[in-house]
Image (cartoon, rainbow, N blue to C red):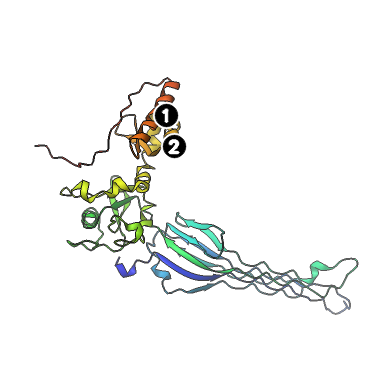
C-alpha cells in the first residue's frame, strides 16, 4: 500500500432521508357516495448505516466523497396505501474505524468486527394519513401529518489500525525490515529516519494455517505529542494493537536515545497492560485482581512477570514504590499468602552480550 493511498482521517456531510407525507384522501367509488378517509401513511426515510469490512485497510475509497444523502420516504396515497420506504445507504469502513460528530455530544460509533452494522443516522418516520384521525366527532378529517425530517451533520471518520502486533520504536530502528522479512509486505526501506510515513500491515503465517496481523508504525520520537517528528497523527494506531513490540537496535545507547520510555509515564502505563496472556495466567495467582487494583493507587501499572507466579508494579519514584510495597504486603498477610517482596530500579542498560 503506497503512502498516497493510506487515508486514516476524513470528514463527510451525511444526511438521512426525510419521512414521506401522509395522505389526505377520501374513498371515492361507484355506489359509495360518502366514503370515509383512506389516506395512507408516508414511508420512512432511509438510514445511513456503517458496516465493517475486513478487506479494507484504509479510508481511501471515501477520499473524494464529500456528501452522502439517503433516499427520502415516499408519500402515502389513497386506499390506505403506504409510501415506499427510502433506500438505506451503507458505508463500508475498515475495522478499527471510529465515527463521531463534532456538532453534538451523541457519542461515537466504533466498528471492530467484519460485517458489523451500526446505524449512524436514523431516517425520519413517515407522517400519518388522515385515516388515523377519524373519530365519532370528526368523521371526515381533511388533514394528515408531514413526515419527520432526516438528520444531517458533518461526520468524522477516524481509522485506528486494528492489528495483533504493533512494531513501535524510534526512526530507523529496523521495523520495516523486520516486517518485510517475516511477511510478504513490501514497505519502503531506507537507511535514514522517517522512511516509513504511514502504517504498513503484514500478515504473518504460523502453525495450523493460522495467521496474525503485524503493523509497522512510523517512528516515534520524544515530543511527538507536541508535534515533533510526524507528530501525534499516527499515535492513534498504537492504541488498538493487542501487543506492542518495541524495536531497539543492539547498537543503541539506551540511556541517551530512549529517555522517552523512562520519562513518558502515561506511555509506560499503557504499555504495561497485557490483554492476551495475562487474562489466562492471572488464574494461577491468588487474589491477583485485588492486588493490582489496590496497587494502581500509586503504581503506573502492574502485570505478571516471567513464567512464574510473580507480580510486578512500576512506580514513579522510590516513595510511591514503598507505598505500593506496603499495600501488597498488607493484602498478602491478610490472605495468608507466602510471598517475597523486592524493591529495585528499572534496568536502563539494555542487552549485554556475554562471551
The location of residue 192, given as percent across then percent down, is: 19, 62
Is residue 116 in view?
A: no
258 shown above or below 26: above
Alpha-carbon neighbours of circle 1 within 10 Å: few (<14), some, or many (≥20)? some
Residue furthest to the front in view is: 319
- Position of the N terminus, as image quadrant, is bottom left
- Position of the C terminus, as image quadrant, is top left
Residue 93, by quadrant, is bottom left
| Mark earlier in primary sequence (2, 1) | 2
The location of residue 351, given as percent across then percent down, is: 18, 41
Q: Nearer the viewer, residue 324 or 247?
A: 324
Alpha-carbon neighbours of circle 2 within 10 Å: few (<14), some, or many (≥20)? few
Q: Which residue is mark 1?
A: 327
Local secondary structure at mark 2: loop
- Residue occupying the point 58% across, 66% down: 47
Is residue 299 in view?
A: yes
253 shown above or below 93: above
The label on residue 297 is 2
338 shown above or below 99: above
Q: Nearer the viewer, residue 219 or 294?
A: 294
The location of residue 6, given as percent across then percent down, is: 34, 66
Q: Are marks 2 and 1 in contact (CB under 8 Å)?
A: yes
Residue 88, by quadrant, is bottom right
Residue furthest to the right in view is: 137
Local secondary structure at mark 1: helix
Q: Nearer the viewer, residue 149 or 140?
A: 149
The location of residue 80, given as percent across then percent down, is: 76, 71
Amino acid at each position: 500500500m503506497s503512502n498516497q493511498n493510506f487515508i486514516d482521517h476524513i470528514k463527510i456531510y451525511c444526511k438521512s432521508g426525510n419521512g414521506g407525507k401522509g395522505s389526505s384522501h377520501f374513498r371515492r367509488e361507484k355506489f359509495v357516495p360518502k366514503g370515509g378517509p383512506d389516506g395512507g401513511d408516508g414511508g420512512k426515510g432511509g438510514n445511513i448505516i456503517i458496516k465493517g469490512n475486513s478487506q479494507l485497510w484504509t479510508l481511501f475509497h471515501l477520499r473524494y466523497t464529500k456528501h452522502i444523502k439517503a433516499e427520502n420516504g415516499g408519500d402515502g396515497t389513497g386506499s390506505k396505501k403506504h409510501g415506499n420506504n427510502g433506500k438505506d445507504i451503507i458505508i463500508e469502513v475498515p475495522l478499527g474505524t471510529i465515527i463521531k460528530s463534532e456538532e453534538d455530544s451523541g457519542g461515537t460509533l466504533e466498528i471492530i468486527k467484519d460485517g458489523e452494522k451500526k446505524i449512524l443516522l436514523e431516517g425520519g418516520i413517515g407522517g400519518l394519513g388522515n385515516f388515523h384521525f377519524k373519530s365519532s366527532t370528526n368523521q371526515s378529517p381533511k388533514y394528515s401529518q408531514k413526515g419527520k425530517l432526516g438528520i444531517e451533520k458533518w461526520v468524522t471518520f477516524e481509522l485506528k489500525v486494528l492489528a495483533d502486533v504493533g512494531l513501535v520504536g524510534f526512526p530507523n530502528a529496523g521495523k520495516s525490515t523486520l516486517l518485510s522479512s517475516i511477511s510478504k509486505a513490501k514497505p519502503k526501506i531506507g537507511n535514514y529516519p522517517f522512511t516509513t510515513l504511514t502504517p504498513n500491515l503484514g500478515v504473518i503465517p504460523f502453525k495450523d494455517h493460522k495467521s496474525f496481523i503485524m503493523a509497522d508504525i512510523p517512528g516515534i520520537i520524544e515530543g511527538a505529542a507536541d508535534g515533533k517528528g510526524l507528530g501525534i497523527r499516527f499515535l492513534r494506531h498504537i492504541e488498538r494493537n493487542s501487543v506492542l513490540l518495541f524495536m531497539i537496535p543492539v547498537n543503541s545507547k539506551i540511556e541517551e536515545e530512549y529517555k522517552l520510555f523512562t520519562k513518558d509515564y502515561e506511555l509506560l502505563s499503557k504499555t504495561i497492560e497485557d490483554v492476551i496472556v495475562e487474562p489466562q495466567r492471572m488464574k494461577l495467582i491468588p487474589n491477583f485482581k485485588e492486588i493490582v487494583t489496590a496497587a494502581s493507587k500509586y503504581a503506573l501499572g502492574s502485570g505478571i512477570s516471567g513464567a512464574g507466579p510473580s507480580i510486578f508494579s512500576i512506580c514513579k519514584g522510590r516513595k510511591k514504590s514503598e507505598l505500593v510495597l506496603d499495600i501488597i504486603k498488607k493484602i498478602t498477610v491478610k490472605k495468608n499468602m507466602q510471598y517475597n517482596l523486592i524493591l529495585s530500579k528499572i534496568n536502563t542498560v539494555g542487552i549485554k552480550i556475554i562471551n
